[in-house]
Image: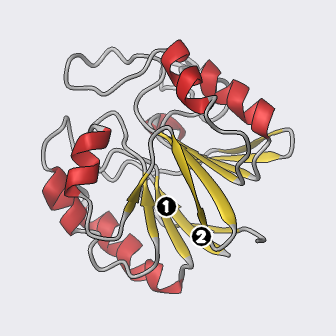
Amino acid sequence: MRILAFSDLHMARNRAAEIAAASAEADLVIGAGDYCNMRQGLDEAMEMLTSIAAPLVLIPGNAESAEELTDAAPEGVHVLHGTGMTVDGLRLFGLGYGVPVTPFGDWSCDLTEPEATELLDRCDATDVLIAHSPPRGYGDVTSDGDAVGSLAVRDAVERLQPQFVFCGHIHDSWGYRGAIGRTQVANLGPKVNWFEVPT
C-alpha cells in the first residue's frame, strides 16, 4: 500500500494543493493534525482537501478538537481519536491533541499523559499509529533543544511495535526520521511524505 502522509497544514493553501495533487498516486492519505490555526478556519482548511479521492484518515491536532474535525471533515473522511480502523487490511489507530499539555492556553486541545495513556490503552495492535504528538525523544526537539514529546505515545509504541508512527506537532523537528525498535517514526510536516507499507 502506498501511503501519503502529512501534518500541520495550518491553512497553507499551496501546501494543501501539493498534497491534493500528489494524492492521485496514493492508496491512502493520512493527516496527523493541525489543519487550521487556533481553532479558526477549519472549514476552509477541509475545503482545501476535498479533491483527495483516495481514502482519507485524519486525526485532530491541538489546533482543532475531535468534534470540530468530525463536523468539518468532508463526507467519507474518517476521523480517529482514541479509535482505530482497518483500510484494505492495514490496521490504523489515531490519537490527536497535544500531549503533554502545551503552554499555548485555552484554545489548545491537549491531553495529560495519563489521559493519553487511557486512550492508547484501547489499542491492542496496529500497523500504523497516528499521533499528533511525537513520542518522547523522537522527532520532538524544539528550537531551544528541549524534548517535548509524549511518554504515553512512546510507551504505546514500545508496547504495540507498529510498522510506523506518523506524527507532527513539533515544527522544529519536521522531517525527522528515526526508529523505536522495529517501528519507524516520522515527524511529517506539511509536505508530501511517501511510505510503502506491505499489507
* Observer-nearest of 77 and 43: 77
Q: Amino acid at mark 1?
A: Ile
What percent of the width, then of the height, locates residue 125? Answer: 73, 45
- Look at mark 2 in the image and give the residue it sits on: 3
Judged left or right of residue 93, residue 58 is left
Relative to 53, say whether 49 is above or below: above
Q: Residue furthest right?
A: 181
- Look at mark 1 in the image and give the residue it sits on: 30
Residue visible at 53% across and 51% down in the picture: 188
Q: Quadrant of the N terminus?
A: bottom right
Residue visible at 42% across and 27% down in the picture: 98
Residue visible at 36% across and 77% down in the picture: 52
Q: How is the image coloured?
A: secondary structure
Judged left or right of residue 63, residue 92 is right
Image quadrant where residue 2 sits: bottom right
What percent of the width, then of the height, locates residue 147? Answer: 58, 20
Q: Quadrant of the C terminus?
A: bottom right
Q: Amino acid at mark 2?
A: Ile
Per the image, label 2 sits on a secondary structure element best described as strand
CB atoms of marks 1 and 2 within 8 Å: yes
Judged left or right of residue 7, residue 185 is right
